[in-house]
Image: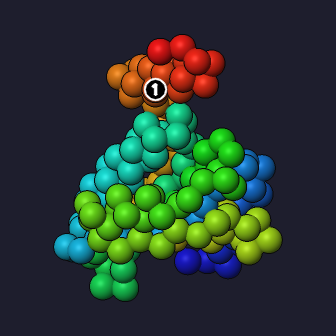
């Protein structure tokens, strides 16, 4: 790789990192798999984000694949945002991934620690080979929204002495 290409890639990572940093994030996550995963990691990550959205109403996520040192197995890095995320216990996020796929580290996002830059570097690191990334917004499914609204109505009725 030429010096010029490296400089262009470095600038691109900085620009993408700066762009990711303009968003509000709740958590930074590293998601691994019990079994070797050679493809489909992003699909699993999207399912996890969909689960989070169904639980909290809406979730925005940036997912980036990274290959392990062996060049074969994949894991994911993720930035996730939900409304009022600073008030949410993140343990269920970890538990859901652990139950389905494997190890999961979920940490509160701290902009000063540079997670946006850390995630964005995988766009270029892996783009030269076969990595992928995704930026998505998932909304709560209609059926789940209806159940949550019914539960909310029941709670409001009980609080107002109806029911």
Q: Position of residue 162 (x, y in %)?
A: 54, 14
Residue 125 shows in the view: yes
Q: Position of residue 99 (x, y in %)?
A: 27, 64
Residue 121: quarter of image: bottom right
**Residue at 46 percent of width and 46 percent of height:** 52
Seen from this angle, which residue lies furthest left? 35
Residue 129 shows in the view: no
Q: Position of residue 134 (x, y in %)?
A: 48, 48
Residue 75: quarter of image: bottom left
User: What residue would you read off at disc 1?
Assistant: 151
Vertical placement of residue 103 versus 81, above or below: below
Q: Position of 56 compared to 8: left or right? A: left
Seen from this angle, which residue lies furthest top? 162
Numbered-mark total: 1
**Residue at 45 percent of width and 58 percent of height:** 93
Q: Position of 96 compared to 16: left or right? A: left
| Quadrant in which the N terminus is drawn | bottom right
Label 1 secondary element? helix
Vertical placement of residue 163 versus 114, above or below: above
Vertical placement of residue 92 versus 49, above or below: below
**Residue at 26 percent of width and 60 percent of height:** 100
């Amino acid at each position: 790789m030429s010096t010029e290409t490296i400089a262009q890639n470095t600038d691109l990572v900085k620009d993408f990192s700066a762009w990711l940093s303009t968003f509000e994030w709740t958590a930074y996550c590293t998601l691994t798999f019990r079994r070797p995963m050679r493809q489909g990691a992003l699909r699993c990550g999207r399912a996890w984000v969909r689960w989070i959205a169904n639980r909290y109403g809406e979730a925005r996520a940036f997912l980036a694949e990274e290959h392990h040192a062996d060049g074969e197995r994949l894991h994911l890095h993720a930035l996730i945002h939900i409304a009022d995320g600073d008030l949410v216990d993140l343990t269920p996020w970890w538990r859901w991934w652990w139950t389905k796929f494997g190890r999961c580290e979920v940490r509160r996002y701290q902009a000063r620690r540079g997670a946006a830059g850390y995630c964005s570097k995988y766009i270029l690191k892996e783009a030269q080979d076969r990595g992928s990334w995704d930026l998505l917004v998932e909304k709560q499914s209609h059926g789940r929204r209806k159940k949550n609204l019914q539960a909310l109505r029941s709670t409001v009725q009980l609080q107002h002495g109806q029911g």
